[in-house]
Amino acid sequence: TGGTQPADHVHGIVVEAMRERDIDLSDRTPREVTPDELQAVDIVVTMGCSASDVCPATWNGENRDWGLDDPHERPIEQVREIRDEIEERVVSLFDELLSQTPSAE
């Protein structure tokens, strides 16, 4: 977990929701994504904000904003919905990218 302005810890409610999927985030610390890191990527996915503040002006990639709610201070039911939506979107993105990759024949 991370972002352009990361929190100093993963929110407890998120840790709880992810534990339900057998993913342990309890010892994780969010980290900042830097403009230098973004130079090497083709797509930046944001969760409800623009990447324009962090992406270098020379970056030619694509920004997809998924417009998701911040799970901080939300009830567990809403955090689960956000978690599930992220999972669905990530799977769809992988499927899309794999369909664009030439097959090795």
Image (cartoon, rainbow, N blue to C red):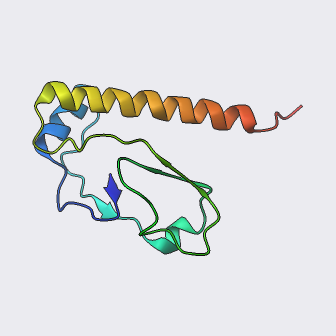
Depth order, front residue of 10/22 = 10
Disc tally is 0
Residue at 32% x, 51% y: name it: 1
Query: Going 61% across and 65% down the picture, which residue do you hit?
Result: 40
Residue 63 to residue 22: above or below: below
**In-front residue for pair 91/55:** 55
Direction from residue 8 to residue 64 in the image, left or right: right
Determine which quarter of the picture holds residue 86. top left
Q: Position of residue 72 (x, y in %)?
A: 15, 45
**In the image: residue 79, left or right of residue 59:** left
Residue 22 appears in the figure: no
Q: Is residue 2 above or below residue 101?
A: below
Q: Nearer the viewer, residue 27 or 68?
A: 68
Quadrant for the C terminus in the image: top right
- Residue drawn at (51%, 74%), measured in percent from left and top? 36
What residue lies at 45% left-to-right and 61% top-to-bottom? 51
Compared to 24, does 2 lie above or below? below
Residue 61: image location, x then y, percent: 62, 59
User: Which image quadrant for residue 34?
Assistant: bottom left
Task: Indicate left or right for 105 with 41 as reference.
Answer: right
Q: Would you say residue 66 is visible in this rendering?
A: yes
Image location (x, y in percent) of residue 100:
74, 37
Q: Quadrant of residue 67?
A: top left
